[in-house]
């Protein structure tokens, strides 16, 4: 009896090793699940809509190419509304119920910072296409992003305004969230370090619509320029209310301005606003093919963050394909640690957004573009990199 029991125990151990943990196995006939975490409704819904559509294109291409060992992928979209309180149950569902192997997202820094610990604890590779807060990569080894950090764009922009545009005085109006506040403080520190003067700093709460009190104070400080490191819903209102108050300063922003919805919300007021974003690389055939597929499927053009979302999804899916193997019963064994290690080794990946390389802590190696809006289109004006403390233009 003891001998039989020993044999059964040994068999069960071998079976467990062959099949892996339940969360690491895709059963025959099921799909490889990845998640998308972002706002699909509310003022910020357009950000999530454009990016999730890009992930769906990547998944369709992956499946059409045979998937991983014949297993198709599926993307599960969770609407955070851009709010931490909505994101927490969403990540719990993706990790605990759906048992996803990767997440593209989240979209906003505050949400990504909140959900990253759960993704890390669950060994879910998370690649954000748009969360730029400088602290995000420090949340764990499973956390990545293919977008430049706030710290990098704030430092470059602080130097650019002071040294290239010779701006002497700036006012800042930011929303109290991790993205906007981080950018505002990093920009302020760098601009002052370069000899500029920040004559006013005003704040508002997420969801506020009326900024006239803050803008009136800013008008009284008479700055040459005003920096709005916010999302498009707030920026459009700030531009409109600045016009109503007769403010004549030049307006500047960050990569949150790059969503094409700003061209509709602000109209002609968007013209001339200068902002930072990852530098646009030479248009590759891969980008042309993606943009054509995206336009044909969704009837609209992808924005810059959508390019990042598409690339992040493909990096994730390639990692799953490269590291997975068939298990007993026709199942698919996916090793989460190996998926993470494969993603971490990404170097010069030829993406739709350009070449992608991750640093040792999961950050993106990036150059910075200076952009403007002109006649309902975005246009790159200049491109820079940092060489130590020196701002170097790339021509």
Image: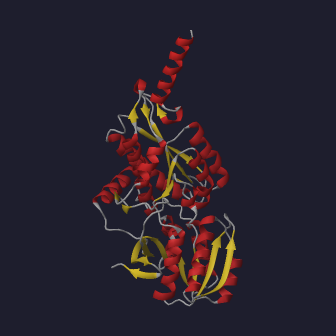
One can see residue 390 in this view: yes
Residue 222 rendering spot, x and y as whole percentages = 63, 90
Residue 189 rendering spot, x and y as whole percentages = 60, 80
12 is higher (above) or lower (below) than 286: above
Residue located farthest toward the right when viewing the structure as drawn: 213
Instruction: Give whichever of 255, 389 is nearer the camera.
Output: 389
Query: Is residue 82 found left or right of 10 in the rendered image?
Result: right
Residue located farthest toward the top when viewing the structure as drawn: 1
Query: Is residue 171 found left or right of 271 in the rendered image?
Result: right
221 is higher (above) or lower (below) than 172: below
The quadrant in which the N terminus is found is top right
Residue located farthest toward the left when viewing the structure as drawn: 285
Q: Residue at x 54, y 57 (%)?
A: 107
Q: Residue at x 40, y 46 (%)?
A: 319
Instruction: Give whichever of 346, 383 is nearer the camera.
Output: 346
93 is higher (above) or lower (below) than 46: above
Q: Residue at x 53, y 35 (%)?
A: 23
């Amino acid at each position: 009896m003891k001998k039989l029991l020993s044999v059964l125990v040994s068999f069960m151990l071998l079976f467990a090793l062959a099949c892996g943990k339940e969360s690491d196995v895709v059963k025959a006939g099921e799909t490889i699940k990845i998640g998308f975490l972002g706002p699909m409704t509310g003022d910020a819904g357009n950000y999530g809509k454009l990016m999730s559509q890009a992930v769906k294109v990547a998944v369709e291409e992956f499946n059409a190419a045979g998937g991983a060992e014949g297993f198709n992928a599926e993307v599960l979209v969770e609407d955070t509304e851009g709010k931490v309180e909505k994101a927490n149950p969403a990540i719990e569902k993706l990790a605990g119920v759906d048992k996803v192997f990767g997440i593209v997202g989240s979209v906003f820094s505050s949400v990504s910072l909140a959900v990253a610990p759960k993704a890390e604890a669950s060994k879910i590779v998370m690649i954000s296409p748009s969360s730029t807060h400088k602290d995000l990569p420090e949340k764990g080894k499973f956390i990545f992003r293919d977008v430049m950090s706030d710290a990098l764009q704030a430092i470059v922009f602080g130097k650019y305004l002071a040294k290239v545009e010779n701006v002497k005085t700036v006012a800042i109006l930011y929303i109290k969230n991790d993205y906007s506040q981080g950018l505002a403080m990093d920009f302020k520190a760098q601009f002052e370090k370069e000899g500029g003067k920040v004559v006013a700093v005003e704040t508002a709460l997420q969801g506020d619509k009326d900024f006239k009190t803050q803008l009136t104070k800013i008008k009284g400080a008479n700055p040459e320029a005003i920096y709005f490191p916010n999302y498009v819903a707030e920026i459009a209102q700030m531009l409109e209310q600045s016009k109503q108050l007769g403010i004549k300063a030049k307006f500047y922003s960050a990569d949150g301005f790059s969503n094409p919805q700003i061209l509709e919300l602000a109209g002609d007021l968007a013209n001339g606003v200068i902002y930072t974003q990852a530098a646009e690389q030479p248009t590759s055939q891969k980008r042309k093919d993606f943009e054509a597929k995206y336009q044909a499927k969704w009837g609209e053009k992808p924005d810059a963050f959508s390019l990042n979302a598409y690339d992040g999804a493909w990096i994730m899916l390639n990692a799953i394909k490269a590291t997975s193997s068939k298990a007993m019963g026709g199942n698919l064994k996916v090793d989460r640690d190996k998926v993470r290690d494969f993603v971490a080794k990404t170097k010069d990946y030829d993406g739709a957004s350009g070449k992608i390389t991750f640093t040792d802590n999961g950050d993106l190696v990036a150059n910075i573009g200076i952009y403007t809006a002109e006649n309902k289109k975005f246009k790159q004006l200049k491109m820079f990199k940092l060489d130590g403390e020196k701002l170097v233009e790339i021509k």
